[in-house]
Amino acid sequence: MRKGTIEMWSILLVVTTLLFQLRVEATSLPPFQNGNVLPLVQAKEILVIGKKSGQWILNAQGVVPAAGRSFIVSDKLDYKLKRFDRSGRIIAQAGKRGNGPGEFRAPGPIASYQDKLIVADFASPRVQVFTQGLEYRSMFYAPGPVVDMSTDNGGNIWIGALTGSARQFLYKVDPGGEVKQKIQLRSMADNEFDQLLSFCIDRAGEIIVAYAYRNEVEIYDQDGNLKKEFEVPGIPLRPKKKVVSRGLFSKGIEIPEDCVLRSVAVDSQHRIFVLADEYTTNPGRDVYALDNQGKLLLIVTLSDRSSRIEFGPGDELYSIEQNRTAVKVYELRTEHKKNIHKGG
C-alpha cells in the first residue's frame, strides 16, 4: 500500500474514533418487539479499574485476558500496556512514546494467544508482538491501518485493516507478519465508514463480524465461506446521517450521525454478544446475546456506556467504559424468573 493511502486511512480512523467518543445522546429506539420473553440477566460489577480505584487509565483501546486471571489493557494516551491482577493492581507495564521496538505511536487494538500479546499502533499498520509479561519480541506491518485483531486456536493472528479497496478482507498472518491467507467479506463497502468493523473468533474457529455503521452480523468459517448473516432485532439497518460542511465554498458531505454496533464478543457457550450503541433503550449499555442463527437470547445492560467488550475466563465480561477511562469486569448472572422486555 502506498504511503499516501495509509495516511489517508489513518486520518479517517482517527476522525471516526472522535465521532465515537464526542457523540451526544440520541433518542433511543425499542430494542425489539413487544412480547418477547427473555431470561433476566444481571451484570454484576466484580472489579472496577479507573480514577476511583486509584489506577489511572487515560484512554483504553483494548483489553484481553492473561494468565492467572489477570488482564492487559492498551492505554493509548499513556503510550503503555498495563497488566492488572484480580485485585486491580498493576503488576507489569511497558511502553513509551516513540517508533522503536517496544515503543508506540499510541497502542490501539490488542489480541492474545497463550503467552503472545499482539499490539497494533492506533490508526496504523504497525504491529508488535510481546510476551504476556510485556517483553518485546518482534514487529511487522499489516496490509493497512488496523481496525481490529483476534487470534484462533492455532495461534494465527487475524487482522481487519483499512486498505482503500471497496472489497473488504480479513488477513491471517503468522507471528512474523507473513500473510498466510485472506478471506473476502461478503459485504461491499459503499463508503469509508462501511469498512469499520469489530470481529472475534470462537472456539470452533468461526469468525463473527459486526459492522460499526450498519446493523449486520456475519459468520464465516476459516476458508472464507459465509455460513450465516443476520441483523440484531429492533435496531435500524443504518444510522441517521448528517451533513458536515467542508468550508464556506465547499459542498457539505454526509456522514453517519451515530454508530450502530460498537463491539462483538463470543462466550464459551458460543453465544454472540453485540454491544449496541445509540439505537437501543440504553445507548451504549445494552449488550444483545444471540445464537449463531441470529435468534435473540437475552439482553444485558451494563452500568455505564461501553466502548468495547471482551470475554475472559469463566465468561467474565470485560468492558471499557467512562469514555475509555475505566475497565470493568462483570459477572453475568441469570435469574430463574422470566422478564418481558417491552419496547417503547
Image: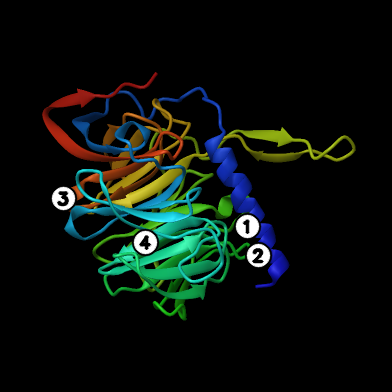
Q: Earlier in the sequence, mark 3 or mark 1?
A: 1
Q: Residues within 10 Å of mark 4 (few under 14, many from 20)?
A: many
Residue type (three-letter) at the residue carrying disc 2: Ile
In the image, farthest residue toward the left: 336
As measured in the structure, the alpha-carbon distance from the residue carrying label 4 to the one carrying label 2 is 22 Å
Q: Is residue 323 left or right of residue 5?
A: left
Residue 336 position in % (x across, y down): 9, 30
Disc 4: which residue = 111
The label shown at residue 314 is 3
As measured in the structure, the alpha-carbon distance from the residue carrying label 2 to the one carrying label 3 is 39 Å
Residue type (three-letter) at the residue carrying disc 4: Ala
Quadrant where the image shows the N terminus:
bottom right
Q: Earlier in the sequence, mark 4 or mark 2?
A: 2
Q: Residues within 10 Å of mark 2 (few under 14, many from 20)?
A: many
In the image, farthest residue toward the top: 344
As measured in the structure, the alpha-carbon distance from the residue carrying label 1 to the one carrying label 2 is 6 Å
Q: At 20% across and 31% down in the image, what residue appears? A: 42
Quadrant where the image shows the C terminus:
top left
Question: Observer-nearest residue: 329 or 57?
Answer: 57
Q: Secondary structure at mark 3?
A: helix
Q: Earlier in the sequence, mark 1 or mark 4?
A: 1
Disc 2: which residue = 6
Q: At 28% across and 53% down in the image, what residue appears? A: 71
Q: Secondary structure at mark 1?
A: helix
Residue type (three-letter) at the residue carrying disc 3: Gly
Q: Secondary structure at mark 4?
A: strand
Asked whether the viewer can see residue 181, the reply is yes
Question: Observer-nearest residue: 30 or 276?
Answer: 276
Asked whether the viewer can see residue 170, the reply is no
Question: Observer-nearest residue: 51 or 211?
Answer: 51
